[in-house]
Amino acid sequence: MIDLRSDTVTRPTKAMLEAMFTAQVGDDVFGDDPTVNALEKMASEMFGMEAALFCPSGTMTNQIAINVHTRPGDEVICHKYAHIYYYEGGAIMRNSGASVCLLDGPRGLITAGEVERHINPDDVHRPVTSLVEVENSMNKGGGTLYKYDELVSISNVCRKHGLKFHLDGARLFNALVETGEKPDAYGRLFDSVSVCLSKGLGAPTGSLLMGNKQFIRQARRVRKAFGGGMRQAGYLAAAGIYALTNNIDRLKMDNERARYLGNVLSKLSFVEMVIPVETNIVIFRLREKDGANEFLAVLRDHNIHALQMDPQTVRFVSHLDFTDEMLQKTELVLKKI
Ligand SMILES: *Cc1c(COP(=O)(O)O)cnc(C)c1O
C-alpha cells in the first residue's frame, strides 16, 4: 500500500520502538518522568525558549496556547485556512470562548500589513484583539513557507500592539531543512511555538509546546483541565527524543520526493494546476470538475491512497514511509491514467 493521505500515517521504526521499550518512566503529572523531562528540556534548548510541555496532539498544544493567551470574547487573528480554526473542530470557541478575525491571502499566508489593519481599536463595541497566529509550513495553502523577514515584521507588529504571537509549527522542521534556518531563530519571534512529533518526524503520537516559564506553568494547568495530563508518558517521549535526534535531516528527502511528484503531475494532461511545491505537501487541481472522487478511486485500484481537498482538488503528502520505489510506482500509475 502507498499511503499519501498524510504524513501522520508513519509507523515507528524498530530503532524507535527499541528506544521506547527501554525508556525510564515515572508519573509525569507529578513531574516524575525523566524521559518526558529530558524531551521537554531538549526541545526548549533547541528553540532557545525557557520551557516546553509534552502533549498528546498538536491540536492540544495549539488550543492550550490559545487558551493561555486569550480571555473569553477576545479575538484571534489568523488565516481563514489556519489549522487552529479550519481543522480543530471549533475548539477556539468551544474551549476558550474566543472569536476569530480571519484573514485571506495567497497560499495560506498572511502579512504584517494585513495583521496591523485588522487589530481592533480600543472601543467597547469591538472584541479585544489579543493573539496572532501563523502556520509554517502552511498545510492547506500547499505546504507553503513564510519568508523569515515577513515573520519578523508580524512579530514586530505584535510587540508594538501588545499582542501575543503563536506559531503552529506542526511541520516546522520540513520548513527548516528547506531554508536552513535554525529553530532558535523561531523561538526568538514567538511567545509560543507548537511542533508535531507525529508527522514527518515519525513518532507515533505527541506534540511539544514551547514558551517562557510562566507561560508553560499556565499551559501545564490547562493541559490538565483539557484532560491531557499523561502518566508514564516517557514511552512516548522516548519516541520524540529519537525523532528529534535522528529524523530531522531526512525530511529533506520527503520534500524532494514531493517536489518530484509535483513535477510529474504538472506535465499530465488531466491536471490543471499544481501549487508550487515548497515542502512535503503537493496540492493539485484536476481539469475535470468534480473529478477528485473518480481520480482517487483509480489510484485506490492501484493501492495508492490520497486525500481530496475539494471536489476538484487532491493532496499528496510524502513522509518517512514513502520510499523511492513507491515514488517510482506512483509515477508509473499517474502516467498511465
Ligand atoms: C496535524 C496538524 C496539527 C496537529 O494535529 P494533531 O492531529 O492534533 O496532532 C496542527 N497544525 C497543523 C498545520 C497540522 O497539519
Image: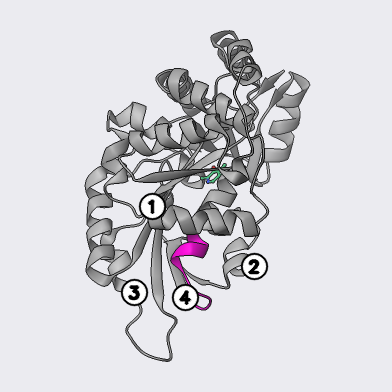
Where is residue 127? Give x, y as percent.
44, 81
Residue 108 higher or lower than 126, as above or below: above
Residue extending farthest to the top is 325
Quarter of the rendering occupied by the N terminus? top right
Q: Which residue is mark 3?
A: 119
Disc ID at residue 103? none
Q: Counting residues from the N terminus, which is met first, the one under dot 3 or under dot 2?
A: 2
Disc 4 to disc 3, C-alpha distance: 11 Å
Residue 233 placement, left or right of 172 = right
> Which dot, 3 or 2, sits closer to the camera?
2
Where is residue 218? Give x, y as percent.
48, 59
Disc ID at residue 213? 1
Q: 318 and 246: which one is in front?
A: 246
Disc ID at residue 74? 4
Q: Residue at x 64, y 38 (%)?
A: 27
Image marks 3 and 2: residues in contact by CB distance under 8 Å = no
Q: Residue at x 56, y 45 (%)?
A: 58
Residue type at mark 4 is: Asp
Q: Which residue is mark 2?
A: 94
Q: Is residue 79 visible?
A: yes
Q: Counting residues from the N terminus, which is met first, the one under dot 2 or under dot 1?
A: 2
Residue 71 placement, left or right of 307 = left
Span of residues in magenta = 65-74
Residue 143 placement, left or right of 322 = left
Where is residue 233? Give x, y as percent.
63, 35
Q: Residue at x 58, y 11 (%)?
A: 15
Disc 3 to disc 1, C-alpha distance: 27 Å
Q: 182 and 299: which one is in front?
A: 182
